[in-house]
Image (cartoon, rainbow, N blue to C red):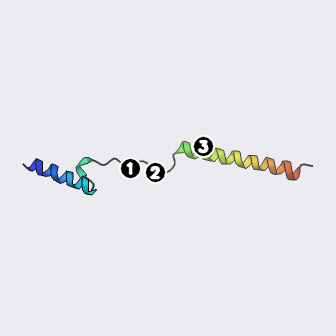
Amino acid sequence: MASREENEQRALDIVAGRADPAAGSPKSGKSGLGGMELTGILLWVLVLLAGAGIAAYYFLAAK
C-alpha cells in the first residue's frame, strides 16, 4: 500500500509543479561559450576590423 501512496504523492507533486527528486532532473547544460565558438567569434571580429581598416585607408588615406 505504501507504493500506491508514494505514487499518489508523486502525482500530486507533479501537478503542483514541485520537482520530483526521484525522477532525476536533467543536468543543466554547460553554460558559456566553448573553444570553437569563441574562436569563430574572434575570427569574425578580426575580419570586420580588417575590413574597416582597409575601408578607412581606401577612403581617407589613399589619394
* Residue 15 image offset from top left, x and y in percent: 25, 54
Q: Amino acid at mark 1?
A: Ser
The alpha-carbon separation of the residues under discs 1 and 3 comes to 24 Å
Cβ–Cβ below 8 Å for labels 1 and 2? yes
Q: Amino acid at mark 2?
A: Ser
Residue at image location 68% in from the left, 47% down from the top = 46
Q: Nearer the viewer, residue 26 or 1?
A: 1
Disc 1 secondary structure class: loop
Q: Which one is earlier in the sequence, the residue at label 3 or at label 2? A: 2
Q: Which one is earlier in the sequence, the residue at label 1 or at label 3? A: 1
* Residue 9 image offset from top left, x and y in percent: 17, 54
The alpha-carbon separation of the residues under discs 3 and 2 comes to 17 Å
Q: Which residue is mark 2?
A: 31
The alpha-carbon separation of the residues under discs 1 and 2 comes to 8 Å
Q: Which residue is mark 3?
A: 40
Cβ–Cβ below 8 Å for labels 3 and 2? no
Disc 3 secondary structure class: helix
Left or right, 9 with reference to 30: left
Q: Which mark is residue 63?
A: none
Q: Specify the farthest residue to the left.
A: 1
Q: Nearer the viewer, residue 20 or 12?
A: 12
Q: Which residue is mark 1?
A: 28
* Residue 28 image offset from top left, x and y in percent: 38, 49
Q: Specify the farthest residue to the front.
A: 15
* Residue 47 image offset from top left, x and y in percent: 70, 45
